[in-house]
Image (cartoon, rainbow, N blue to C red):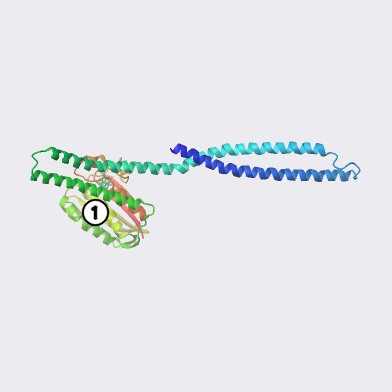
Amino acid sequence: MFETARFKLTAWYLLIIMVISCAFSLVIYRETAREVERGLRAQQVRIWAQQGFFAPPFANIDADQDLLTEELGQLRLVLFLANLGILVVAGGAGYFLAGKTLTPIETMLEEQKRFVADASHELRTPLTAIKTEIEVAARNKSLDLIGAKKLIKSNLEEVNKMQSLSDYLLQLSRYQSNAFKLPAEEVDLQGVVSRAVDKLEPIAKMRGVVIKLDIAPVRVSGNKDSLVELVGILLDNAIKYSQPKKQIIVAVEPAPGGANVSVQDFGTGIKASDLPHIFDRFYRADSSRGKSLTPGYGLGLSIAKSIVDLHKGKISAQSSPAGSIFKVFLSL
Ligand code: ADP
């Protein structure tokens, strides 16, 4: 499909270039012919005058006309060869440029296809679980009230998973849409961190993880709700990938032109081979996939990155088997 589009685009480039080039050649040819003819006439008058107007006027006219025809033939050949050269060079350059123009579109479409495939795959897992459970229950003639309640509870869990996946997908598409602009204001990062911590403290307590804060009073320009979401995602991961009794340190410090926010954990760490991919959509390190106890879809960090990008900030991760640290730079 893209090869056909590339040829079509090349053809359009070529058509435009060749129309301009041929029009120029025509103008050059006409003007040169007119100039040469005018020069020839002037020369004939000069010769006639030098001969004292005795000879019949324009005696050499036939010879000159032959010369003119020959010169113009030569010019036509040169212009034809030049246009042929332009056709070949413009064809090659047009094909190259068409490729350059279409490559980002092709990449975007491929990404979109992958996104739809990944999302459908993630949605199919809970749907299959629900379907299988209902089918088994429907075939079970001795299904009692307790069994039915168990089935409903299990189905509800799967529905909740699907709901959280669709929430993630909606958030991601909202943040990554080109038309989306975050309403910006002056935001106090202390407030942002405390709102995120308030939300996640109960989960941390449940998992026996301790959150420590080291927050300097810094204000940045941004959107409070999405910054709370950003810190929440990093904190949620830090809790998810930490063993009980481990610490998590959330820090905010001023930096030249802005502020640095960091979330450090002393949990499982991320393998060096996974680190370059963790911000990709649906990417989960094998170690996280394997553990059915670690819920997630591999979308949190892509949402975090989209939020940071919308704030024109920077996000990075460092990790070792002793733990990970995620750093975010936000400008003033
Ligand atoms: P998930 O829902 O799987 O947590 P994310 O996009 O938030 O999705 O993270 C992508 C992957 O990066 C995770 O599956 C996990 O392997 C890894 N990861 C993210 N944060 C941490 C962390 N603090 N410690 C260890 N691994 C992490």
Residue 302 in percent (x, y) is at 31, 48
Give the residue pinned by disc 1: 249
In the picture, measured across the screen, residue 140 lies left or right of residue 83, that is left
Which residue sits at x=46%, y=37%? 4
Q: Position of residue 84 (x, y in %)?
A: 61, 36
Q: Quadrant of the N terminus?
A: top left
Q: Is mark 1 within 8 Å of ligand 1?
A: no
* 55 relative to 182, above or below: above
Residue shown at the point (68%, 38%) measured from the top left: 76
When the figure is inspected, residue 306 is found, relative to residue 47, above or below; the finding is below
Binning the other alpha carbons within 10 Å of mark 1 as few (below 14), some (14 to 19) or many (20 upward) gives some
Determine the image quadrant of residue 322: top left
Q: Is residue 98 left or right of residue 306?
A: right
Question: At numbered mark 1, what does the secondary structure look like: helix, strand or loop?
Answer: strand
**Screen quadrant of the C terminus:** bottom left
Residue 12 image offset from top left, x and y in percent: 53, 42
Asked whether the viewer can see residue 265, the reply is no
The amino acid type, in three-letter code, at marker 1 is Ile
Q: Nearer the viewer, residue 325 or 200?
A: 200
**Of 8 and 263, the residue lying toward us:** 8
- In this image, 194 relative to 16: left or right? left
Q: Residue at x 23, y 42 (%)?
A: 288
Count the marks: 1
Please indicate, yes or no, whether residue 87 appears anywhere in the rendered image: yes
Residue 131 found in image quarter: top left
